[in-house]
Amino acid sequence: MAKDWTKLVKAYKGLWVALAEDEITVLGAGKTVQAALLAAKEKSNEMPFLTHVPDRIVSYVGSI
């Protein structure tokens, strides 16, 4: 099932985000992976799912 990251994109544009296992709960965020991990470590001992939120969303339609 796809996750709705609409709010995540609006709130964390251009940042690295550390997410909980549910891939929705934000444990930490920062300009670098290290900053996001440090912020997440303060909230939880679990290994977060890390992702970079783009500055803007660009649609892509591929072809073969």
Image (tube, rainbow, N blue to C red):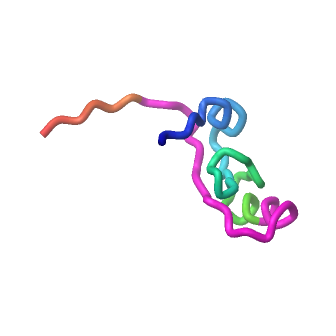
Q: How many marks?
A: 0
The answer to which image quadrant residue 53 occupies is top right
* Residue sitting at x 67%, y 62%: 48
Give the left or right position of residue 51, taking residue 59 as reference: right
Residue 50, given in percent of the width and then of the height, sits at: 61, 58
Residue 18, given in percent of the width and then of the height, sits at: 69, 56
The answer to which image quadrant residue 63 occupies is top left
Residue 58, given in percent of the width and then of the height, sits at: 43, 30
* Residue sitting at x 73%, y 64%: 37
* Residue sitting at x 69%, y 39%: 12
Q: Is 60 rendered above or below residue 26? A: above
* Residue sitting at x 66%, y 46%: 15
Q: Quarter holding the C terminus?
A: top left
Give the left or right position of residue 13, taking residue 56 as reference: right
Magenta segment includes 6: no
Residue extending farthest front:
1
Q: Is 49 rendered above or below residue 47? A: above
Give the magenta-colored segment's residue range. Answer: 38-58
